[in-house]
Amino acid sequence: MKQKPKNIILCGFMGSGKTTVGRRLAQKAHMEFIDMDDYIEQREGRTITDIFAQDGEETFRRMETEAARELASRRGLVIAAGGGTLLRAQNVKIFRKSGVTVLLDTPIGFIQERLKNDTARPLLQKPNRKKVVADLYRKRLPAYCAAADVIVDGSGGADRVAGRVLEQVK
Ligand code: S3P
């Protein structure tokens, strides 16, 4: 039997399109799609918001690393990582061993627009969201770039971006 391909791990800021692009990419590449946040929520039986509120961010980050280990032990997956996952060296190492890490480099204006009315992301539930997003984005960008094997322009529709990713990881 033919061996399944290596995983493709999409990383980038919240709202950069990891989930929508990841779904499309998985269809195009005939791979299985897994969104890490959904995976953790299902495993825990509660939402990310509840995990942050009840147990704090550090506990969530430990869950992310556990999830990364589990997913990295499989093959043939397109994984939409959480926006904070690839900021930890440990997770970068885990994922890079299992496949290729791809940064969706999406313009900050698109991201701010997409996150404008978000209620599901605990880190954004603060006043002056636009600035919170811009500051965090600026702070994180160097780490995202360092964690990525390839960087792909994340602007445009999911189908086009998924096509760009496939070109890069072929
Ligand atoms: C986070 C991003 C979220 C989620 C959690 C924390 C972050 O994932 O894991 O709210 O630290 O950037 P998405 O990037 O899928 O929104």
Image (spheres, rainbow, N blue to C red):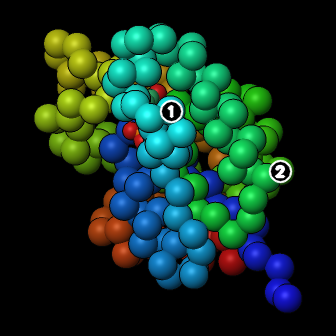
Q: Earlier in the sequence, mark 2 or mark 1?
A: 1
Seen in the picture, residue 11 relative to 166 is either above or below; the reply is: above
Tell me if residue 92 comes above or below residue 76 in the rendering: above
Looking at the rendering, in which quadrant would you find the C terminus? bottom right
Q: Amino acid at mark 2?
A: Lys
Q: Quadrant of residue 54?
A: top left
Q: Residue at x 60, y 32 (%)?
A: 64
Q: Is residue 114 above or below residue 86?
A: below
Kindly identify the residue that appears in the image at 57 percent across and 80 percent down: 29
Amino acid beneath label 1: Glu
Counting other residues with Cα less than 10 Å from the Cα at mark 2, is it few (<14), some (14-19), or many (20 or more)?
A: few
Q: Which mark is residue 97?
A: 2
Image quadrant, ligand 1: top left
Residue 136 is situated, as x and y percent measured from the top left of the image, at: 40, 22
- Residue 46, how many percent across, how many down? 40, 31
Q: Quadrant for residue 61, please give it.
A: top right
The residue that disc 1 covers is 44
The residue at the point 52 percent across, 45 percent down is 39
